[in-house]
Image (cartoon, rainbow, N blue to C red):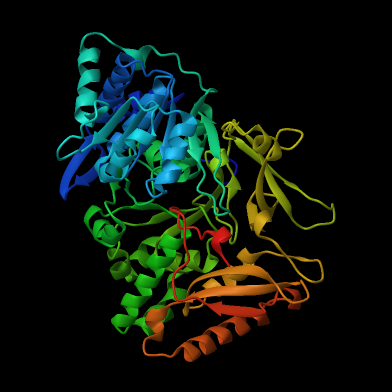
Amino acid sequence: MKKGLPTHMVYQFDNLYDGVVKQAARYGDKDRYVYKVKKEERHFTFNDMLRHVNWLSSAINTLGLCEKYVGVTGDTHPVYAATYHAVVTTGGVIVPLDKEISAEQFVGFVNLCKLELLVYTASMHKKLLPLYDQMPTVKYFVCADFAGEAPEDSRFMTYEAFLEIGKKAYEDGDRTAETTVQDRDKCCAIIFTSGTTGTSKGVMLCQRNLVTAALDSAGIIEVDDGESIVSVLPIHHTYEFTITHLAAPNIGVTVSINDSIKNTLRNFAHYKPSILVLVPLYLETMHKKIWAEVEKKGKTGLVKKMMPIAKKLPWSIRRKIFKDIIGAFGGNLWLVVCGGAPLRPELIEEFGAFGIKVLEGYGITECAPLISCNPIHWRKKRSAGMVVAHMEARIDKENPDDETGEIVTHGDAVMLGYYENPEATADVFTEDGWFRTGDIGYIDDDNFVYITGRKKNVIIASNGKNVFPEELEEYLGISEWISECAVIGRKDEAGEALITALIYPDYDKFEGKTAEEIKETIDAEVAEVNKKLPTFKHIGLVEIRETEFEKNTSRKILRYKLK
């Protein structure tokens, strides 16, 4: 067995409906989801998912919506996942929409795709009701967990009413889900990227893309049906949907749904997850809470003294030594899968010392999204992981002598293209059909990917050399005094790029300090970073922010808004 390849069972499925059927057969009345509605805990089993997908498919057929474009939006919810599966199963195209986008953007996406059905959770009702008349193509607005007076619009119905239409049709013999021929290579989903550059494109994915990414996830991350996850990332993101809502259930993992950001730690304590799927910002927040609590208990010195010792001990012993730290997350957490942005290696080391494994992966929406991930038993420091089984990656260099180049990829998870945007589609594929990720890096002899920066973010120094902001941001992020940072190139009077660090300090640590004292401390931290870098990468200007950076829903800083 080649090192890094799976040694565990990976259950195969051919399409989304095939997965739902096989999972129900394996896990039956086991909880697929545990969630809350107005603080009331509810349970949704694997059998429930099969029933809902069957009934929803029959409702879609009864109302003449097969092979149509359907939107889904709102909170993470079993209804969201069931709708996604049913629309795809009936030959339609699902369009998951970010609940946080502006009303103007929302209406724009709905009308661009000419959606005929829009399913949403109750928290979205007040936002969407005034927009009904601006979305003329929508024939039915369906709201889950609706409570209140129904709007005077004949197109509105509750999810329960919509499901009842399908249930009756199913009981009368409609078997749309079972009889629809599944075309794995037809567009089945349009994902509007949340991009940090101010543009948003509709990524067209097919079932082959989604199934490939889900199976490759399960193949490289070795877990079993005894695990549990708390879902904290937005479900409309492909990273969250593929890993948490496709791959995890296929292994029999129960997914508990975090009902709000403010309740995250409380829900960890209640649901006791063994696995979390996160982006780096969440892990950074957890890290800071750990040390704040350690400091509060006056144990900082003791913990720091024990960590180097713990790294030499078996994982089970580490977990016993730091059981109080693990207990803050429910007591069972042993694995964190992290992607979506660069992750500081120090976080992996520290969580590892506590007995929690952190696996960094790499992907992009256009690859559904998985390209690489570190296997549990073969992790490489600073690597974004080994290229997964059904994908290939290579480095395209502008100059053969360059150490790095653009990461391009090819395989069954690569998108069909951008919706109604052939020019953008053509731009991101090489002449031989490989997808250009826009990321810069290198690949080692074991097929592990290392990312050094984003092509769009590169700063051209005065000597013509490339400076990648991500590298400098990683150095700055180590500082306990810095909460958030971004590095950009500002033009000086001579028109040269001046490397500038925009910094949002950790103001909790500066309580009672003046603005001048804060600036003095941050300047000293930046000076320490500069000592580690060649002169052409030195940060020449520091600007202190009083507010956090604007971010998208995957918690990435919106770079196009940096000034």
Does residue 420 sit above or below 301 in this rendering? Answer: above
Residue 208 at x, y percent in the picture: 52, 28
Front-lying residue, 74 or 266 = 74
Does residue 279 sit above or below 347 in this rendering? Answer: above
Quadrant holding the N terminus = top right
Residue 381 at x, y percent in the picture: 58, 61
- Classify residue 467 by image quadrant: bottom right
Residue 245 visible in the picture: yes
Q: Along the horizontal axis of the image, is 11 left or right of 413?
A: left
Residue 230 at x, y percent in the picture: 32, 50
Quadrant holding the C terminus = bottom right
Front-lying residue, 466 or 132 = 132
Residue 314 visible in the picture: no
Front-lying residue, 159 or 184 = 159
Q: Along the horizontal axis of the image, is 368 left or right of 434?
A: left
Q: Along the horizontal axis of the image, is 342 left or right of 145?
A: right
For the image, the number of numbered tags is: 0
Residue at (32%, 64%) from the top-left corner? Answer: 326
Residue at (62%, 34%) from the top-left corner? Answer: 421
Specify the farthest residue to the top: 173
- Classify residue 415 by image quadrant: top right
Residue 256 at x, y percent in the picture: 28, 46
Front-lying residue, 309 or 537 = 537
